[in-house]
Image (tube, grey):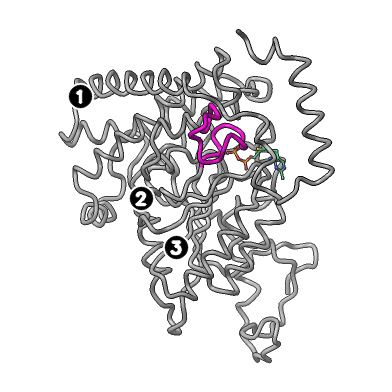
Amino acid sequence: MLAASNLSPIFSLTNKFSEIIGYPGAPKAPLTKEFGFSKGLDKPIPIFQILDKDGKISNPEMMEQVEKVLDKKRMLKMYHSMIKIRIIDDLFVIAQRQGRITSYMKNTGEEAIQIGVAEAMDKDDVAHMQYREHGLVMHRGFTVDEMLNQCLATTEDYLKGRRMPIHYGSKKVNCIPVSPPLCTQVPQAAGQGYTMRMDGRPNVTVCFFGDGSASEGDVHSGMNFAAVRRSNTIFLCRNNGYAISTPVKDQYRGDGIASRAIGYGIPFIRIDGFDIFSTFYTTYRARQQILGKDETGEAHGPIFIETMGYRLCNHTTSDDSLKYRSQSEIDSWANHHDPVNRFRKYLIEKGHWSKEEDKDFERQTKKEIADALHRGEVKPRVAPERICEDVYAEVTPRLKRQFKFSMATRAKYEAEYFEK
Ligand SMILES: Cc1ncc(C[n+]2csc(CCOP(=O)(O)OP(=O)(O)O)c2C)c(N)n1
């Protein structure tokens, strides 16, 4: 018998099988004579990988499976998107620093997640995003001009200039517009995944959130609902080590976020978020599994993916991450775990790509984005007077008060806001 103060891994508690009573709350649990407080999993959940940090295949068996689906053309399309989104991030931040865009956030270090997942999705699958998933939106067909319409609040912005920059979304690419309050997307994705299953549609929702956002109550509601209702939903937690300035050690005490899926009865996997083959293949297999049946012939239900990574950029353009982490920490991750470098090394080694092509592609792409910036800047902007339209048939008294206040503030600081 274990001493009461001992903490044991969960599995050893069940090694003396005995009668199963079938309590409604845990119908398969046997009785045990052992006593002990379980500390949970006996080992950390491992991280699935195919492409290692040096751009070499560390998992040839799995790579064989990947190559059955991904040919050179598709791989290059993915690589081009990774380069393009990185250039967009760099140029949009410069534009923000010049006062041309109000705020911005990069997805540097997470490109393999965005592009790998996007490539594995069907066009009728729906993405529910947090805000660091613009690589995915772009890879699904959202153009640089459309991004700029949103960031600059031009009259062509589908969201009518009413959201913070980079909170993209559009029916055209089946991406639900990003909502600033964290994790409102999680119950929504669970609900929509449930509808897809009920309607017999061969599609899934893919729901993204960060390690910090996983602390929101909505994640619990959404994951539990999806598990019970067997929603066609892939939950994807991007564990990048920080929630603005809060490191994960101050966010949770368990084994990352993947361990929580056990509690919901959701099958899970933890993968290397810098490895584009892992992100692609895992999403591809998760879709297949969700759209099939489980061993009892029932709909499979959701799958949980935790991508392990590191936020190589500041949180937003309002953040200076050197206030809470060192340059040497960032450098060490950037030098050894850059997802773009990793994929480039693989493609060059394989003979699919060359350094010269890389330079040419980068030059052309920079020009393409700079031209789009020039086009976007001269477009007319949404008139602030339209901000309360389309919500209520009659503007509510509270909104009227807010609108008046906002217009007065705008008039007072006209010179600062609108340089002539
Ligand atoms: C409900 C809610 N609480 C707080 C915030 C402020 N906030 C915006 S982003 C963020 C950090 C989220 O971190 P994480 O989920 O780890 O994602 P990451 O930025 O690292 O990609 C916080 C606290 C918010 N937008 N909504």
Residue at the farthest front position: 394
Total marks drawn? 3
Separation of residues labelled 1 and 3 (CA atoms): 36 Å
Q: Position of residue 75 (x, y in %)?
A: 25, 42
Question: Which element is circle 1 on?
Answer: helix
The one of 191 and 351 positioned closer to us in this rendering: 191
Residues packed near mark 2 inside 10 Å, few (<14), some (14 to 19) or many (20 plus): many
Where residue 368 sits, quadrant-wise, is top left
Q: Name the residue under label 1.
A: 357
State the residue at coordinates (55%, 12%).
98
Tell me the kind of residue under disc 2.
Phe
The one of 320 and 143 positioned closer to us in this rendering: 143
Q: Which of marks 1 and 3 is nearer the N terminus?
A: 3
Q: Where is residue 322 in the image (x, y as percent from the top left)?
A: 63, 20
Tell me the kind of residue under disc 1.
Glu
Q: Earlier in the sequence, mark 1 or mark 2?
A: 2
Q: Which of marks 2 and 3 is in front?
A: 3
The one of 32 and 271 positioned closer to us in this rendering: 271
Q: Is residue 122 left or right of residue 168?
A: left
Q: Name the residue under label 3.
A: 204
State the residue at coordinates (19%, 31%).
353
Q: Give the range drawn in magenta.
A: 150-168
Question: Which element is circle 2 on?
Answer: helix
Q: In this view, does 394 lie to the left or right of 212?
A: right
Q: What is the number of the mark on residue 280?
A: 2
The one of 60 and 110 positioned closer to us in this rendering: 110
Q: Position of residue 265 (x, y in %)?
A: 58, 70
The image quadrant where one finds ligand 1 is top right
* Principal secondary structure, stretch drawn in magenta: loop
